Image (tube, rainbow, N blue to C red):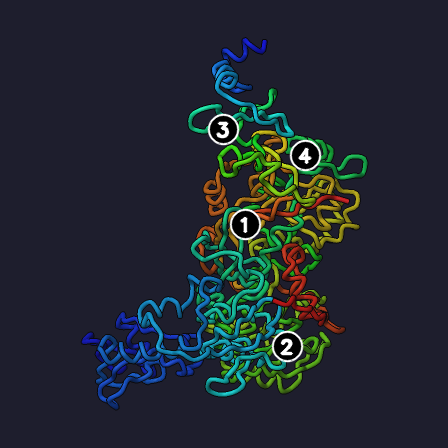
Amino acid sequence: MGLFKNIFIWWDGATIGTAWHSLRKGRFIAEDSSGNRYYESKKGPRRRWVIYASGKPNDASNVPAEWHGWLHQTVEDVPDQSLPPARAWEAPYTANLTGTGGAYHPAGALESNRARARASGDYEAWSPS
Amino acid sequence: MPKVTVDGIATEVPDGATVLQACEIAGKEIPRFCYHERLSIAGNCRMCLVEVKPGPPKPQASCALPAAEGQEIFTTTEMVKKAREGVMEFLLINHPLDCPICDQGGECDLQDQAMAYGKGHTRYEMNKRAVTEKYMGPVVKTEMTRCIHCTRCVRFAQEVAGVEEIGAVGRGENMEITTYLEHAATSELSGNVVDLCPVGALTARPYAFEARPWELRKTPSIDVMDAVGTNIRLDSRGREVLRALPRINEDVNEEWASNKTRHAVDGLYRNRLDKAYVRKNGKLETASWADAFAAIAGAAKKAGSKVAAIGGDMVEVEALYAAQKLLEGLGSKQIEGRQNGMDYDASNLAAVNFNTTIAGIEEADAILLIGTNPRWEAPLVNTRIRRAAKAGAKVFVIGPEIDLTYPVTWLGDDAALAADLPEDAADALKAAERPALIIGGGGIMVPGLQAASLALADTYNLIRDGWNGYNVLHFSAARMGSLMLGWAQPGGTADLAAADPELLFLLGADGVDFEAFSGAFKVYVGHHGEQGAAQADVVLPGASYAEKSGTWVNLEGRVQRGNRAVFPPGDAREDWTIFRALSDALGNTLPFDTLDQLRDAIAAEFPALADEGLAEYEWAPPKLSDGAPSGPIALPIKDFYLTNAICRASETMQRCSAELIHGEEFAEAAE
């Protein structure tokens, strides 16, 4: 299944080309807490890339903030060495939740189930008792 | 009739006209802030400056200058423009530039006139004046820093409302408009100062920060809070009526409206009936229209022709007529529009009408009030009586002692006085050229007092050439309309109860003595859930006055039409369509499908209701046996602000009642 998928689809894990390239030209650097694997080119101009954890869609927002910096060559070393340790008050990173059940809905959206603000034409109906 | 020239246009003006009026006759617009046609002339804003020859070589305030023969008036010269620009610059020195957060924005005289005469920049570098807030009651919101001291509100309070509670203290830059002791403006007309205020100093408190004037859809309508039939404009946005403003009608309300007319509209959105209900096992449960109609059809089958209908205080002619036809189809003529049990003789419409007309009562030179509080029953009639009193009319009152805003002679509150008038009142009525008698709802309810008042009309010759001084002051918007359609039984609702109906229709009638109809299957058609809906076996949701096009007849017999401003909420429908649909379910379809067809049917049967305008009634008073009235007269309205279901649902009216009538203090949230 894995190989089949790697050949025919591009949205789940690395394609066959990327996997082959990573194996030949890439040096594996580290894997982050959610399972994304980070690579750097062995030779030539320095390129960095990521192969997303399997089971997660290929969505750039899956890369946590600290690895984003490394990936875009903002920092030289891997986050553990180049960044100060995470503070106690920092919330864990979450990917973009749009389109999922955890998506944000403003107060008043039908999905939010919260009371909406008063709008023009609202009325209080009478009820017996 | 002086002849003047305005910018080269020769114009003839009436005697006593001012230069400003002469300019208006000639079609020239003069900017103004303090001048108002209906108030005395103050001449303190100086915006209406014009050049006049002959005269001193300086601009003249046209509002305070009488037009004289041969005057040459110039309104567009360089001197006039410069003078007005100067006045505008002075006014703007102390006026805050808060138009974006000001409720007057878009309908502000200062804003408009600054477009024409504003300089666009300021030469003033010092601090602006700021004024502490004043509290002017639950309907007027103040922002006195914006005040330009035109004193229109002060003059209105003194001259029209007749309560000296807004005044000015201090002079020059330190002048401040205030309510004496900052008491809530207790007049029931105080809301009019909001319209008079040319800037945003006085704005409507319930409407604060709600909408901009250009967002609103304006619908001409007729007010139903009292029987005056105030011509109003309902301003709505989307499905909500946000405010009611008076329209100009010189014969009815001039350009005023009572606070109840203006601010009861928030009651249209509380306690509404929006679904049909049917009583099952003693409890009202929601039902579809079809189920509700089926329940009524079942009851109608059992009742046969033992059907009756009672009309409420705010129902329009169309609904009454449709209900009447429905009942006729069932074989019943048991209809009554006086829900509170009044049983005066209504066989002659002229004898239960305000014959002098609202505008005409100003001409009266002796007025006898019997059992009425016009200040609460019809505030805009009270301003007319007040004007008559100021012009020298003597006013006598039989009834409880109350402050009517003008000097009156109290004769006492014993109804027997009407049969035997004290000498001073009798002499005044006899000597008067245009004597008038006004009997109110409190008076006409007393047995025998109607006969006594009609006898007075005979004795003092109140009906003479070109003058009918006999007036009945109703306080329900539906009253004259329902009487014209014949919704009156000789014994009032008691006659209906005596006939023991098995099916009873209540058209927005909440004040009925429900005990008397305990055996009947009650169908309530109305818009607010109150006693009537709670007592009913079937509730059908109807439309309020803002939600239907209807015809109302005011207390002087003036047929007036209002238009629908918004749609009724939920499943509610316009009342006449409910009766039309119900007639189908009862197998006796009414012969009209559209409002036009219905109105044609009404016009064919009651020609007086065909067109808008004053209906003609022939004066033929009924011969009533003298009932020898006696005992103290009680007034029917106990609380001006809570007289009908819409007011009682309105938060603003509840607050007005608590604060202005019951004297509760309301802490203002710090802003």
Residue assigned mark 3 = A48
- In the image, residue B330 lies at what x, y percent? 64, 37
Determine which of the numbered discs, if any, sits on residue B240 in the image. 1
Q: Secondary structure at mark 1?
A: strand
| Eye-nearest disc, 2 or 3 | 3
Circles 4 and 2 on the same chain: yes
- In the image, residue B390 lies at what x, y percent? 52, 83
The answer to whether any part of residue B126 appears in the image is: yes
Q: Nearer the viewer, residue B228 or B195?
A: B195
Q: CA distance from mark 4 to mark 2?
A: 51 Å
In the picture, the quarter occupied by the C terminus of chain B is: bottom right
Residue at figure coordinates x 66%, y 53% from the top left = B489
Q: Nearer the viewer, residue B245 or B130?
A: B130
Asked whether the beta carbons under mark 2 and mark 1 sit within 8 Å of each other, the answer is no
Circles 2 and 1 on the same chain: yes
Residue assigned mark 4 = B292
Tell me the subunit letter for badge 2. B
| B437 to B497, vertically: above or below | below
Q: CA distance from mark 2 to mark 1?
A: 32 Å
In the picture, the quarter occupied by the N terminus of chain B is: bottom left
Residue assigned mark 2 = B183
Q: Nearer the viewer, residue A69 or B594?
A: A69
Residue at figure coordinates x 64%, y 73% from the top left = B370
